[in-house]
Amino acid sequence: MAAHRTATHNVGAVHGHDPVTASPLMTLTYRSRATAPLSESQLGELQHRAAARNRAEGVTGMMVYNDDRFFQWLEGPPASIARIWSSISRDPRHVDIEAISVHTAPSRLFANWSLKLTTGHGDPWLDEISAARVSSTNVAAEQLAALVIATEPNEARRLLNAAYAEFRSISAVIELLIEPTARRLGDLWADDDCGEYEVTLGLCRLQTFLREIASDGVQQHTEHPLVVLVAPLPGEIHMLGATLDAESLWLAGHDTRVRFPSTEQALQQIVATNWFDAIDLSLSPAFLREHRITRMSQIVDTVRRASKNPALVIVAGGRAFYDRTASSADVHSDGSSTSAAHLSDDIARARSEHH
Ligand SMILES: Cc1cc2nc3c(=O)[nH]c(=O)nc-3n(C[C@H](O)[C@H](O)[C@H](O)COP(=O)(O)O)c2cc1C
């Protein structure tokens, strides 16, 4: 398959089997450029015929057509994918066809769509993000997780920008997409569907894309801004949680300071020499970090003792608190937060209980 032109990731052993066909499941993504802009009816015709053939082949997927560019995700039995890919790569309606990734997958993301079409106008992808508000399965986050670790992550960037254009709220993008995508990356790792390097890469990219979106955020006015230190727990290499927390606290109007102390001593030094009303200490947004919980409780204790402000309020964040495998009692903090989107409220609650 010409798809191997571009580096793929995590191909490894074939471990994904489609429950419908009982054969291994292959996913292929590529992008291309329309030779000439397609009218709505030409696009409809293309989709209609492609969906019929996909159905016959047991293939499902989605296609994005936006700004004369195609992005397509196909999943199905390897032989079917190879046949369809061979037709697609010979199709004169597009050029600059570039495979992004080819790999086996544990399950289908688009089981219900022979070929879902998304154009960015009245985007069905956005309907899915909205559906994620009320449902526990977040298909949009599953897609984003796959896209953000692809060789070429621009489609992930585009989808995040589309979500922001729709919601006009950085908090909504964080809570509905970025945090669920981080957890999804952690799940892919836990199921052996990607490596730790890819999780870290994916989290870094999410951080980069968020910063692009957040650059036009406007800080709210608040009557009583707090001086808050935001820091990953020393030893935690995933910085995305701290970035999301800092972004969201800043938007809520707080005087937010972000530090990345590499040791417990460095953190003590920061709180001993600066006055903070509250500290937000975070663990990975992707992994549960079970082995760090006891360590976190020790660090919380020493930070409290070292603090210049004797009434310092400490709030803990990270996937462990979202999944409730750890609580504030476990880490000796005054509160915990399940999402950066309501961290400001979580700190306010912890302060009122503390005083
Ligand atoms: C951007 C793009 C995406 C396409 N996606 C599919 C697809 O998912 N499935 C499919 O059967 N054909 C798809 N086609 C159409 C095929 O290229 C081809 O026209 C069709 O499968 C008929 O195949 P044949 O010409 O080999 O008979 C796509 C074409 C383009 C330009």
Image (cartoon, rainbow, N blue to C red):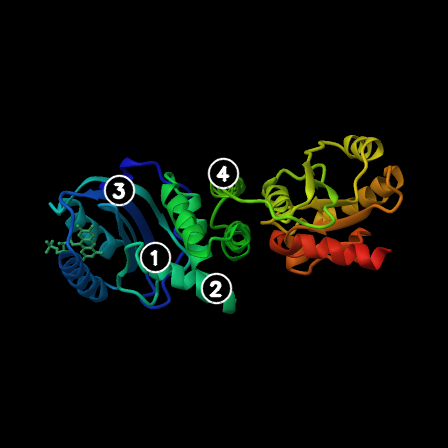
Q: Nearer the viewer, mark 3 or mark 1?
A: 3
Identify the residue shown where x is 34% and y is 57%.
Answer: 25
Q: Nearer the viewer, mark 2 or mark 3?
A: 2
Q: Quadrant of ligand 1?
A: bottom left
Residue 63, position in %: x, y?
A: 27, 54
Residue that label 1 marks: 25
Judge the density around disc 1: few (<14), some (14-19), many (≥20) Cα neighbours within 10 Å: many
Q: Nearer the viewer, mark 4 or mark 1?
A: 4
Residue that label 4 marks: 208
Residue that label 2 marks: 132
Judge the density around disc 3: few (<14), some (14-19), many (≥20) Cα neighbours within 10 Å: many
Q: Earlier in the sequence, mark 3 or mark 1?
A: 3
Please say whether residue 77 is visible from this viewpoint. no
Q: CA distance from mark 2 to mark 1?
A: 25 Å
Amino acid under label 3?
Ala
Please say whether residue 47 is visible from this viewpoint. yes
Q: CA distance from mark 4 to mark 1?
A: 31 Å
Residue that label 3 marks: 3
Q: CA distance from mark 2 to mark 3?
A: 32 Å
Q: 211 left or right of 50?
A: right
Q: Earlier in the sequence, mark 4 or mark 3?
A: 3
Ligand 1: does it lie within 8 Å of the C-beta at label 3?
no
Q: Earlier in the sequence, mark 2 or mark 4?
A: 2
Q: CA distance from mark 4 to mark 3?
A: 28 Å
Q: CA distance from mark 3 to mark 1?
A: 16 Å
Q: Secondary structure at mark 4?
A: helix
Q: Is residue 212 above or below residue 122?
A: above
Q: Earlier in the sequence, mark 2 or mark 1?
A: 1
Quadrant hosting residue 259: top right
